[in-house]
């Protein structure tokens, strides 16, 4: 039995080592902050190709009044009346170099609040190593459960008297955050190595500024519809306009 | 413009043999496509492996995937070291210390079907603890390869490093006894319970606060019925303190980082009262 076990271990080891080894061939370079003598801007719109789904109202069980202060609508797919998709994450794919993150301002940390039993905002971007301040404006019991895979998962109780919880993340990752007490609460924390990120607004618009001159791959990620990419060339002092069209029939998951 | 599946179907491309990988996957260099890690090897690997096969594999499976030959006969599913966090920890949010794993191995888990292995001496129990941690590390590495195969934010050479980080023993919480001023105060305990515990464990402790609680794999789990007086992590006050302070990784049970030590002790006493003691 032992020799069979060892054989299986050996074969498995080779398989995993090969996967890791071949993956190393496409290793991404580290991001480098540089002074940009010239740069351009990428602006765009995220369109939803299809009938806008009706907002899904969540039925909240009886309980804390604060959860009933406003109707709660699911935010995984938010489409405007004119067919624009909100909460899509638009970023440059693997930029080698570019601008720095805005300076850290301890007075204005990046915030993920719990208001009316919702996470606000639905999608937050936080640089690697910088503080994400989780607030409990509701003043009731929540638990802040970040289901990280590259970073250490976090699940901290946030009882009513606990108003702030500061978190930092070591590695870039899209982390779903939930509250198990109120299982409709869900948000995404995008931990990023570089500052070229934008979240599409209610009108589907987004903007990436101070983008280095040249050709870039712009990536869109949406929690329900997966990933889209397109190439865009940025010229000095110019605005490059792009449109992403998300087709729900091609939903990735 | 191309639509890509975020979660690519790499799993199908992984040789079936990969499903059997165990500890050596991150310590053996494969010719022609070697990888390496700084992870500490298990001190006496062949003895650890023999101990695991002899004592653990019938339920947890040879590769630690929780699918040993006895698993289907058990009412409580054996832990899948590959995909699931270790639950019983004395480090906030985990991972467990070596002593935590030794305690589980030698003492068993009262509410599951994990028996105690008191006849294993401390040296063997520590070897086994290191071995199951390695199984978990290999599982995390495999998960990362599959989950992040098309993710441009991961550096492929980070995978072994992340896996090691994710399973390295956590810093144990200081278990501080009640202060000199501490007095058992049932009303204070009741109030703390209402604010910190009742939303999941229910107002009266019957474990009826959540509708459909799930674990990290999406499997239904029970919120502990405190009034049953039975606790998988142990009913001793010190164990209760650790559960409340550190949480139970892989489940909805969070760390209670905002409470003072005396507040945690009030909760321990109140939970003990609900448990009928």
Image (spheres, coloured by chain):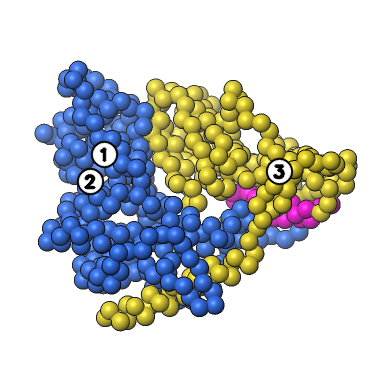
Q: Secondary structure at mark 3?
A: strand
- Residue B194's disc is none
Disc 2 chain ID: B
Q: Quadrant of residue B259?
A: top left
Label the yellow chain with its letter. A
Percent x, y of residue A81: 72, 39
Q: Is residue B204 left or right of residue B80?
A: left
What is the count of numbered marks? Answer: 3
* Residue at screen point 26% across, 62% down: B128
Q: Where does label 3 land, which residue?
A: A33
Percent x, y of residue B24: 39, 70
Q: Where does label 1 land, which residue?
A: B242
Q: Secondary structure at mark 2?
A: loop
Check whether the beta carbons of the residues at disc 3 and disc 2 lie within 8 A of each other: no
Viewer-side residue, A13 vs B213? A13
Q: Is residue A165 visible?
A: yes
Q: Where does label 2 land, which residue?
A: B233
Label the blue chain with its letter. B
> Is B235 part of what is drawn in magenta?
no
* Residue at screen point 72% across, 51% down: A95
Q: Nearer the viewer, mark 3 or mark 2?
A: 3
* Residue at screen point 35% across, 40% down: B92
Q: Is residue B185 left or right of residue B214?
A: left
Q: Secondary structure at mark 1?
A: helix
Gap between marks 1 and 2, in whole Å? 9 Å
Question: The magenta stretch spans which residues?
Answer: A216-233
Gap between marks 3 and 2, in whole Å? 48 Å
């Amino acid at each position: 039995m032992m020799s069979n076990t060892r054989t299986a271990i050996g074969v498995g080891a080779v398989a995993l080592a090969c996967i890791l080894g071949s993956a190393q061939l496409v290793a991404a370079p580290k991001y480098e902050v540089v002074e940009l003598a010239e740069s351009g801007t990428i602006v765009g719109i995220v369109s939803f190709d299809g009938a806008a789904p009706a907002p899904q109202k969540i039925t909240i069980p009886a309980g804390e009044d604060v959860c009933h202060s406003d109707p709660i609508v699911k935010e995984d797919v938010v489409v405007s009346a004119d067919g624009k998709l909100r909460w899509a994450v638009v970023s440059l794919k693997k930029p080698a170099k570019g601008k720095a993150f805005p300076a850290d301002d301890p007075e204005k940390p990046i915030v993920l609040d719990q208001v009316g039993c919702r996470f606000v905002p639905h999608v937050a971007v936080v640089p690697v190593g910088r503080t994400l301040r989780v607030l409990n404006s509701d003043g009731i019991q929540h638990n802040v459960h970040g289901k990280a895979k590259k970073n250490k998962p976090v699940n901290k109780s946030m009882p009513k008297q606990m108003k702030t919880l500061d978190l930092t993340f070591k590695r870039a990752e899209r982390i779903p955050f939930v509250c198990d007490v109120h299982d409709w609460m869900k948000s995404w924390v995008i931990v990023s190595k570089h500052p070229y990120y934008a979240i599409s607004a209610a009108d589907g618009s987004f903007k990436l500024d101070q983008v280095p001159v040249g050709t870039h791959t712009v990536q869109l990620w949406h929690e329900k519809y997966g990933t889209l990419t397109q190439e865009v060339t940025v010229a000095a002092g110019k605005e490059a306009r792009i449109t992403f069209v998300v087709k729900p029939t091609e939903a990735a998951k | 413009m191309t639509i890509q599946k975020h979660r690519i179907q790499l799993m199908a491309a992984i040789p079936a043999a990969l499903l059997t990988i165990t500890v050596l996957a991150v310590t053996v260099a494969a010719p022609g496509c070697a990888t390496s890690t700084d992870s500490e090897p298990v001190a006496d690997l062949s003895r650890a492996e023999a101990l695991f096969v002899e004592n653990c594999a019938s339920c947890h499976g040879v590769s630690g995937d929780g699918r040993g030959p006895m698993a289907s006969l058990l009412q409580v599913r054996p832990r899948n070291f590959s995909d699931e966090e270790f639950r019983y920890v004395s480090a906030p949010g985990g991972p467990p210390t070596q002593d935590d794993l030794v305690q589980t191995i030698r003492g068993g888990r009262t509410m599951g079907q994990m028996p105690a292995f008191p006849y294993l001496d401390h040296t063997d129990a520590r070897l086994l603890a290191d071995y199951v941690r390695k199984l978990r590390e290999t599982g995390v590495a495999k998960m990362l390869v599959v989950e992040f195969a098309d993710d441009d934010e991961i550096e492929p050479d980070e995978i072994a490093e992340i896996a090691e980080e994710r399973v390295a023993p956590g810093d144990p919480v200081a278990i501080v006894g009640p202060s000199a001023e501490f007095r058992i105060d049932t009303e204070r305990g009741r109030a703390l319970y209402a604010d910190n515990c009742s939303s999941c464990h229910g107002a009266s402790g019957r474990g009826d606060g959540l509708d459909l609680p799930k674990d990290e794999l999406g499997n239904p789990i029970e919120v502990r019925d405190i009034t049953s007086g039975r606790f998988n992590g142990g009913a001793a006050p010190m164990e209760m303190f650790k559960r409340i302070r550190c949480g139970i990784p892989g489940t909805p049970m969070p760390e209670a980082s905002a409470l003072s030590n005396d507040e945690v002790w009030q909760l321990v006493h109140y939970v003990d009262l609900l448990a009928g003691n």
